[in-house]
Each structure stands twice: as C-alpha cells, then as structure tokens.
Amino acid sequence: MSIPVSDDDLLSYVDGFLDPGRVDEVEAWLAANPRDAERVRQWREQVDGLHRLFDPVLDETVPDRLGVAAVKAGARARWLGPLLRVAAMVLLVLAGGAGGWWLRGGTGGPAATPGAMVAAEALSAHVVFAAEIRHPVEVAAGERAHLVAWLSKRLGAELKVPDLSAAGFSLVGGRLLPASSGPAAQFMYENSDGRRVTLYLRRNTEGTETAFRFAAQGRVEAFYWLDGPLGYALSGDVDRERLMDMAKAVYHQLES
C-alpha cells in the first residue's frame, strides 16, 4: 500500500530533495490531484522568483566592516554579531527554496529606484501569500476596522481599503509586512474563481511621485506608483488590462 503524499513530500519534490523512489508516486498523485499540482506550480514559481530577485546578493562584495579582520578586532562588536547572524539567515533563506521569502527589497542592486523597490517587494509578497490556503492574511475582512486602524498606526499614515467589488473581487483581509523602508501592509482580495490580487503599501520615504508603471515576476504582474507619503502596488495573475483598470480604480478611491 502506498504512503499518502504529504506537504513535506511536495516541498521536497519542489526543492529536488525527494527520495528518487518516491518521485513516481508523487508525480502520480499530482496527476490525479489538480489542486496540489497547482500548489506545486506556484511553489516552483516562488523559487524561481526568489532566485531572480536575490541571487545577485550572493555576488555582492562583503563590506570591510563585516570582514573577518573587523570581527576579530572586535569592531562594533555589540551590533556586528547580530548583523552577521541576520546575513547568515539571508543566505539560508536563499538556499531554502520554497521555505523562504524576501528579505531584501530591490531588483538586483543598490541603484534600484524607490518605485522599483516597492514593485519588487510587492511581487514577492504576493507570490508568497496569494498561494496560502489556510492563512492568507493575519486579520480577516470581518475585522476591517481593526485591520485598518492597526496597519495605519504601524505605517504612520491613514490607510484606506479600496473597494474592488466592481471588478468581482472582495476583501479577504490583510497583514503587516517588513520592507526595506520599515513596515508595509498588504490587503488581499479574491474573486469567485479563487483568483487573488493584493494591494501593497509602504512609506514613500523620498517623497517622489510617479505615474503608473508596470513590473512582473513570472506570471504575476503589478502596476505600481508613488503618491504622497506612500508607495502602492497592485499585483495579481490576471489579465494586464483588467489589472490596470483595477489599479486605476484603487488610485481614484485613495485620492477621493
């Protein structure tokens, strides 16, 4: 009798660590279970996206202050130790495939613009959380008032939750996220087919403004912009024109 296929089996399959003798059973399971097959596809997309976003970090030169000599000399010992541990965690996440997600916003280097940073962080967050079945959000739509008040306080700006019901999407809820500029927020929406879009918001520290711009990570696309104290990105695996229409609706609602 075959052993039931678990999430551990599926994740090991995605990461290439599954016992060779188990691969045929898992592939047969996926052929018979489209829902799990779709999860595996999304996980693989996450892995590919993470490598595209963060592999360049591995090629960056280590600053002198993080070198072995500085450590041995005890330079800035109080904060260097924790910083090195964080750096080690980043490398482990990068090597961990589907088990990790973004720890660095950006598109491959320090020259990334603020808008591009918003897009990269938004796309990574969407890829990770839109695939979640049981825990897609921290606070559900049923606690909308609490969700908005909490995230507004954390971001230091009065947030609004746009209504996308005209496009067929209803609010699922939201969550607090880390970003390169501090805290960020994500509101998630879902339509009757189970397709999801997310609105990502974070502080616009440079105060610049931009028109709508487009970015993509695999099949997930985003329209992003900077306006006033915040940067925004609407992400989803939906038709581009439809996503643009929703982004415009979000913009107009936030401006009203």
Image: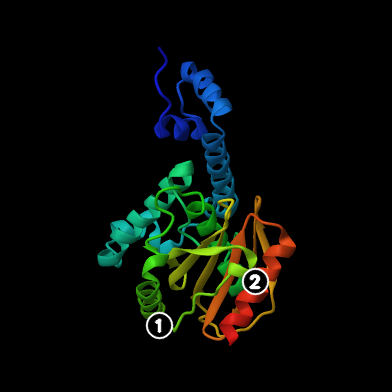
Q: Is residue 176 visible?
A: no
| Kind of residue indicated by mark 2 | Ala
User: Which element is circle 2 on?
Assistant: helix
CA separation in Å, label 1 and label 2: 23 Å
Q: In the picture, residue 71 is in which quadrant?
A: bottom left
Badge 2 crowding class, 10 Å Cα cut-off, few under 14, some 14 to 19, many 20 or more, is many
In front: label 1 or label 2: 2
Q: Which label is found at residue 247?
A: 2
Badge 1 crowding class, 10 Å Cα cut-off, few under 14, some 14 to 19, many 20 or more, is some
Q: How many marks?
A: 2
Q: Nearer the viewer, residue 115 or 69?
A: 115
Q: Which label is found at residue 108?
A: none
In the picture provided, is 254 more to the left or to the right than 147?
right
Q: Is residue 203 above or below residue 223?
A: below
Q: Residue furthest top?
A: 1
Q: Nearer the viewer, residue 75 or 156?
A: 156
Q: Residue at x 63, y 83 (%)?
A: 209
Q: Is residue 11 above or below residue 191?
A: above
Q: Nearer the viewer, residue 31 or 98?
A: 31
What colouring style does the render use? rainbow
In the picture provided, is 130 more to the left or to the right than 138?
right
Q: Which residue is mark 1?
A: 156
User: Which element is circle 1 on?
Assistant: loop
Q: Residue furthest left?
A: 78
* Residue 168 locus on image (x, y percent): 61, 63
Q: Nearer the viewer, residue 110 or 233?
A: 233
| Kind of residue indicated by mark 1 | Gly
Q: Residue at x 62, y 79 (%)?
A: 251
In the picture provided, is 157 more to the left or to the right than 227?
left
* Residue 117 locus on image (x, y percent): 57, 68
